[in-house]
Image (cartoon, rainbow, N blue to C red):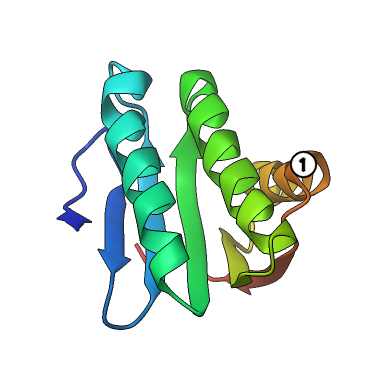
Amino acid sequence: MEILSTRVTPYIRIDEHLSELEISGISNPRDSQDFYQPILSSIINFVPKRSHINVSFHLEYANTASYKWLFLICKQLSNFLSKGYKIQATWHYDLEDDDMKQLGEEFAILSGLQFSFHETELTH
Protein backbone atom coordinates (compact mmCIF):
# COMPACT_ATOMS: atom_id res chain seq x y z
CA MET A 1 0.00 0.00 0.00
CA GLU A 2 1.27 3.43 -0.87
CA ILE A 3 -0.57 6.71 -0.43
CA LEU A 4 1.21 9.75 -1.78
CA SER A 5 1.26 12.86 0.37
CA THR A 6 -0.84 15.91 -0.34
CA ARG A 7 -0.88 19.36 1.20
CA VAL A 8 -2.98 17.95 4.06
CA THR A 9 -2.25 14.21 4.25
CA PRO A 10 0.95 12.31 4.98
CA TYR A 11 2.80 9.85 2.83
CA ILE A 12 1.90 6.32 3.87
CA ARG A 13 3.81 3.21 2.80
CA ILE A 14 3.21 -0.34 3.89
CA ASP A 15 5.84 -2.44 2.13
CA GLU A 16 5.11 -6.14 2.46
CA HIS A 17 8.40 -7.20 0.85
CA LEU A 18 10.59 -5.12 3.14
CA SER A 19 8.27 -5.42 6.18
CA GLU A 20 8.17 -1.66 6.60
CA LEU A 21 5.58 0.90 7.59
CA GLU A 22 6.25 4.59 7.01
CA ILE A 23 4.14 7.62 7.89
CA SER A 24 5.68 10.98 7.00
CA GLY A 25 4.76 14.55 6.22
CA ILE A 26 1.80 16.69 7.22
CA SER A 27 -1.29 15.16 8.79
CA ASN A 28 -4.21 17.55 8.58
CA PRO A 29 -6.92 15.62 6.72
CA ARG A 30 -10.46 17.00 6.61
CA ASP A 31 -11.79 13.72 7.99
CA SER A 32 -9.16 11.87 9.99
CA GLN A 33 -11.33 8.80 10.44
CA ASP A 34 -11.93 8.41 6.69
CA PHE A 35 -8.22 8.78 6.06
CA TYR A 36 -6.77 6.65 8.87
CA GLN A 37 -9.34 3.87 9.38
CA PRO A 38 -8.31 1.97 6.21
CA ILE A 39 -4.65 2.41 7.13
CA LEU A 40 -5.21 1.03 10.63
CA SER A 41 -7.11 -1.91 9.13
CA SER A 42 -4.22 -2.56 6.71
CA ILE A 43 -1.74 -2.52 9.60
CA ILE A 44 -3.87 -4.99 11.56
CA ASN A 45 -3.81 -7.34 8.56
CA PHE A 46 -0.15 -6.67 7.68
CA VAL A 47 1.68 -7.25 10.97
CA PRO A 48 0.66 -10.87 11.72
CA LYS A 49 2.12 -11.97 8.37
CA ARG A 50 5.61 -10.72 9.31
CA SER A 51 8.29 -11.87 11.72
CA HIS A 52 9.73 -8.37 12.06
CA ILE A 53 8.39 -4.91 11.22
CA ASN A 54 10.29 -1.63 10.86
CA VAL A 55 8.08 1.37 11.57
CA SER A 56 9.10 4.93 10.79
CA PHE A 57 7.26 8.13 11.70
CA HIS A 58 8.48 11.50 10.42
CA LEU A 59 5.75 14.04 10.85
CA GLU A 60 6.17 17.72 10.10
CA TYR A 61 2.76 18.58 11.53
CA ALA A 62 -0.28 16.74 12.87
CA ASN A 63 -3.59 18.28 13.85
CA THR A 64 -5.46 17.25 16.99
CA ALA A 65 -7.86 14.96 15.10
CA SER A 66 -4.87 13.10 13.63
CA TYR A 67 -3.36 12.57 17.09
CA LYS A 68 -6.12 10.11 17.96
CA TRP A 69 -5.50 7.98 14.88
CA LEU A 70 -1.74 8.14 15.10
CA PHE A 71 -2.03 7.10 18.75
CA LEU A 72 -4.35 4.21 17.78
CA ILE A 73 -1.75 3.05 15.28
CA CYS A 74 0.96 3.19 17.96
CA LYS A 75 -1.29 1.40 20.45
CA GLN A 76 -2.08 -1.35 17.94
CA LEU A 77 1.62 -1.80 17.20
CA SER A 78 2.30 -1.96 20.95
CA ASN A 79 -0.38 -4.65 21.27
CA PHE A 80 1.38 -6.69 18.59
CA LEU A 81 4.68 -6.15 20.39
CA SER A 82 3.21 -7.50 23.63
CA LYS A 83 2.09 -10.62 21.73
CA GLY A 84 5.67 -11.35 20.70
CA TYR A 85 5.90 -9.65 17.32
CA LYS A 86 9.20 -7.88 16.70
CA ILE A 87 8.59 -4.21 15.97
CA GLN A 88 11.37 -1.67 15.58
CA ALA A 89 9.83 1.81 15.78
CA THR A 90 11.66 5.02 14.92
CA TRP A 91 10.37 8.53 15.51
CA HIS A 92 12.14 11.12 13.35
CA TYR A 93 11.76 14.79 14.17
CA ASP A 94 13.31 17.95 12.84
CA LEU A 95 16.12 19.39 14.94
CA GLU A 96 14.16 22.54 15.81
CA ASP A 97 10.73 20.93 16.23
CA ASP A 98 10.27 20.24 19.93
CA ASP A 99 6.51 19.74 19.46
CA MET A 100 6.94 16.73 17.18
CA LYS A 101 9.61 15.27 19.45
CA GLN A 102 7.30 15.68 22.44
CA LEU A 103 4.41 14.09 20.53
CA GLY A 104 6.53 10.99 19.90
CA GLU A 105 7.57 10.87 23.56
CA GLU A 106 3.93 11.11 24.66
CA PHE A 107 2.84 8.39 22.23
CA ALA A 108 5.62 6.15 23.55
CA ILE A 109 4.54 6.64 27.16
CA LEU A 110 0.81 6.32 26.53
CA SER A 111 0.87 3.48 24.01
CA GLY A 112 3.76 1.44 25.40
CA LEU A 113 5.49 1.42 21.99
CA GLN A 114 9.14 2.24 22.50
CA PHE A 115 10.69 4.45 19.85
CA SER A 116 14.24 5.18 18.84
CA PHE A 117 14.31 8.95 18.46
CA HIS A 118 16.34 10.52 15.65
CA GLU A 119 16.93 14.21 14.99
CA THR A 120 17.03 15.29 11.38
CA GLU A 121 17.68 18.63 9.77
CA LEU A 122 14.88 20.31 7.87
CA THR A 123 15.70 19.94 4.19
CA HIS A 124 13.46 22.62 2.70
Q: Compare residues 106 and 113 and report the one nearer the observer.
A: 113
Q: Residues within 10 Å of mark 1 (few under 14, many from 20)?
A: few
| Amino acid type indicated by mark 1 | Glu
Quadrant including the C terminus: bottom left
With respect to residue 35, does 51 lie above or below? below
Q: Compare residues 21 and 79 and report the one nearer the observer.
A: 79
Residue 97 appears in the figure? no
Residue at x 56% of width, y 26% of height = 68
Residue 78: x and y in percent read 67, 53
Q: Compare residues 81 and 106 and report the one nearer the observer.
A: 81
Q: Quadrant of residue 111?
A: top right
Q: Which residue is mark 1?
A: 106
Q: Quadrant of residue 34?
A: top left
**In screen coordinates, is 4 left or right of 76?**
left
Residue 99: x and y in percent read 67, 41
Residue at x 50% of width, y 58% of height = 57
Quadrant including the N terminus: bottom left
**In screen coordinates, is 116 left or right of 9?**
right
Residue at x 69% of width, y 69% of height = 84
With respect to residue 121, does 12 lie above or below? above
